[in-house]
Structure formats: C-alpha cells, structure tokens
Image (tube, helix red, strand yellow):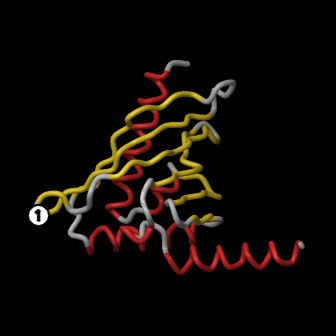
Amino acid sequence: MTSGLAMKIYQKNLDAVSEALMDGDLPKMMRHIAIPNMMSTCDKEIVMSSPEELDMVMSDFRTQLLSHGVETYTRICLEADFVVGRNDMIAGRHETSTTGADGVAVSPYLNHMVLMKIDDQWKGVWLQAVMKNTELESLSPDIADAQAEAHRVLETLRR
C-alpha cells in the first residue's frame, strides 16, 4: 500500500464529507463517518455514539459556518499514509479553508484525521481540528461540556 493511494482515499473522504456537511445531507455523511466517532479541538472533545448525535453536531457546525458567511468549505489533504501494519487504517493531515462573498470567511486551519475501512467503506473515526473550539465552535459546546462533566463525575466515582 502506497502513500499515494492513502492520500487519494483520504481526499475522497474529505470531499464527500465536506459536500454532505454543506448540503446538510446526513445519510450521505453516514456513508463516510463511523459511529462511534470522536472529534476534538485543542480545548474540547466530543464522542458521537449515534446518528442522531452526529446529526446534531454537524447541524450545529454547519450553522456556525453559515453564520460566518461561509459559501465554500474546502479541505485539502496535505499528507496521508497507511498506519504501519494496518491496511485498513489511514492517518493523515489536511487543511480546511473557506470562502464567502468577501473572500476568506474563516481563517484556514489544520486538522488530523484517521480513517478506517469498515464493511468495505473508508470512514472517518477520529478528527482533531488544530484550533480552539471558541474560534469557530466546530463542536457543539453544550454536548462537549455535558460529556466533559460526565467524564469528571465518572472519574470521581472511580476513586
């Protein structure tokens, strides 16, 4: 397996999910994102364990993009390769850029993502945006905060 093939698979997933996000098309998105799914920023993380949670998080993110005047949402693979010893997993890095009526709508930012081949389909299982969630609220703050609080409570109970 070559890194060229990994980059092609990674970019194909980026394009499909980006289009589904901007179209608000959950069924299409579900063909390219695994459940459960983990997404994070430098200061928040969220695990989506159902299609309904994915729909809520992605709808919130799409609303954020549109409120910033985003008309085009583009993600470009910078590097990707198969995980050593795994022909069913790809790790990579990409840049997200947006445009609106007045040019750049949201400053470009970097991301890391892992894809896994599940039932013969490449799906995103983990994504990290290299930015603070307060910069764009790419993760639903209410859900992320509730999950963080639940995690803190569980950690307290385990002690």
- Give the quarter of the image for residue 132: bottom left
- Give the percent coordinates (x, y) of residue 22: 32, 61
Seen in the picture, residue 39 relative to 63 is either above or below; the reply is above
Q: Residue at x 44, y 42 (%)?
A: 13
State the SS at label 1: loop
Q: Residue at x 10, y 63 (%)?
A: 102
Q: Residue at x 51, y 18 (%)?
A: 2
- Give the percent coordinates (x, y) of residue 150: 71, 77
- Give the quarter of the image for residue 66: bottom left
Left/right placement of residue 142 relative to residue 101 reads: right
Report the front residue among 86 and 94.
Answer: 94
Residue on which disc 1 sits = 101
Seen in the picture, residue 113 relative to 88 is either above or below; the reply is below
Seen in the picture, residue 61 relative to 77 is either above or below; the reply is below
Q: Residue at x 35, y 45 (%)?
A: 95
Report the front residue among 103 and 49.
Answer: 103
Left/right placement of residue 159 relative to residue 133 reads: right
- Give the percent coordinates (x, y) of residue 52: 57, 71
User: What amino acid does circle 1 point to?
Assistant: Ala
**Quarter of the figure with the N terminus:** top right
- Give the percent coordinates (x, y) of residue 81: 52, 28
Q: Residues within 10 Å of mark 1 (few under 14, many from 20)?
A: few
